[in-house]
């Protein structure tokens, strides 16, 4: 059985990752691909339990190192219970955030030692690096406005949305630096565009890559 393909979506708050993942998943299924859509933190029962702890801010007082370890524990469970089995079965996995978010949120703005972050990363992903990462780039202030607009009435900002604009600007730049350092894997998309225009750019990137690296679905599979 042919190996599947692992695509991650990265970017700051309010960049539209969830919307674009949903749209891409629908288009891939229409083309006959088997698709799994998942997210981080979360994606597996164990990781979803950790997600609540992280996003509620309960672990914040213990510092960024503890948050990084919690993310790593959730990611390890997610990879081994969900992502790896799906990839090995030939599916295309679309994940809302993955290792690059940890590199940015804990490594850069959390000021965690690079060597420690690399060691945590190796254990957490156990070789399961994304084949393609879509970085949705958006002005930090615009992203926070979008994030606020999408929240339900009475729902407050989560652990990361509530941080200062300066922190969000640093994260945006850190994502761009990662993309520049790994251009084969990482593709930057302007998320300030109309969602339909953003979707079109993403589809051109994804289907162009899949044509080169993934066996096309047969008529029987469709």
Image (cartoon, rainbow, N blue to C red):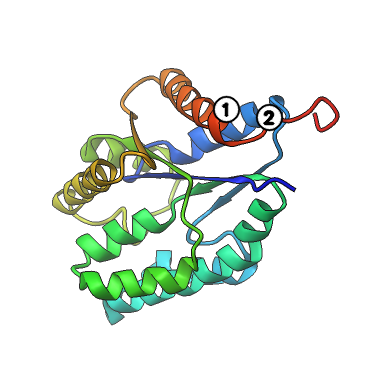
For the question of whether residue 52 can be seen, the reply is no
Name above or below for residue 181 compared with residue 156: above
- Please tell me which residue lies in front, 10 or 205: 205
Mark 1 neighbour density, 10 Å: few (under 14) some (14–19) many (20 or more): few
Where residue 171 appears, as percent x and y from the top left, is 23, 50
Mark 2 neighbour density, 10 Å: few (under 14) some (14–19) many (20 or more): few
Residue at figure coordinates x 42%, y 18% from the top left: 197
- Left or right? Give the position of 63 relative to 71: left
- Please tell me which residue lies in front, 67 or 92: 92
- Left or right? Give the position of 37 relative to 62: right
For the question of whether residue 199 can be seen, the reply is yes
Circle 2 residue: 216
- On the image, which quarter does residue 212 sit in? top right
- CA gap between label 1 and label 2 equals 7 Å
Residue at figure coordinates x 72%, y 52% from the top left: 89
Circle 1 residue: 211
Which tag, 1 or 2, sits closer to the chain's start?
Answer: 1
Residue at figure coordinates x 21%, y 50% from the top left: 174
Instruction: Please report contact status of discs 1 and 2: CB closer than 8 Å, yes or no.
Output: yes
Residue at figure coordinates x 46%, y 56% from the top left: 129
Name above or below for residue 71 compared with residue 29: below
Secondary structure under the numbered disc 1 in the rendered image: helix
């Amino acid at each position: 059985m042919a190996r599947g393909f692992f695509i991650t979506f990265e970017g700051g708050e309010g960049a539209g990752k969830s919307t674009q993942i949903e749209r891409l998943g629908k288009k891939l299924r229409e083309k006959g691909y088997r698709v799994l859509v998942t997210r981080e933190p979360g994606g597996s029962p164990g990781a979803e339990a950790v997600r609540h702890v992280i996003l509620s801010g309960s672990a914040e007082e213990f510092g960024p190192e503890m948050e990084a370890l919690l993310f790593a524990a959730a990611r390890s469970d997610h990879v081994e219970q969900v992502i790896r089995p799906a990839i090995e079965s030939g599916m295309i996995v679309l994940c809302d955030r993955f290792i690059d978010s940890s590199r940015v949120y804990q490594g850069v703005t959390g000021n965690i030692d690079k060597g420690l972050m690399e060691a945590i990363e190796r254990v957490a992903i156990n070789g399961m690096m994304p084949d393609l990462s879509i970085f949705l780039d958006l002005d930090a202030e615009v992203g926070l406005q979008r994030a606020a607009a999408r929240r339900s009435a009475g729902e407050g900002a989560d652990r990361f949305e509530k941080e200062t604009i300066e922190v969000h600007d640093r994260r945006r730049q850190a994502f761009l630096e990662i993309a520049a350092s790994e251009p084969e894997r990482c593709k930057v998309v302007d998320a300030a565009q109309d969602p339909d225009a953003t979707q079109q750019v993403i589809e051109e990137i994804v289907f162009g890559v899949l044509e080169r690296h993934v066996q096309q679905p047969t008529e029987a599979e469709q």
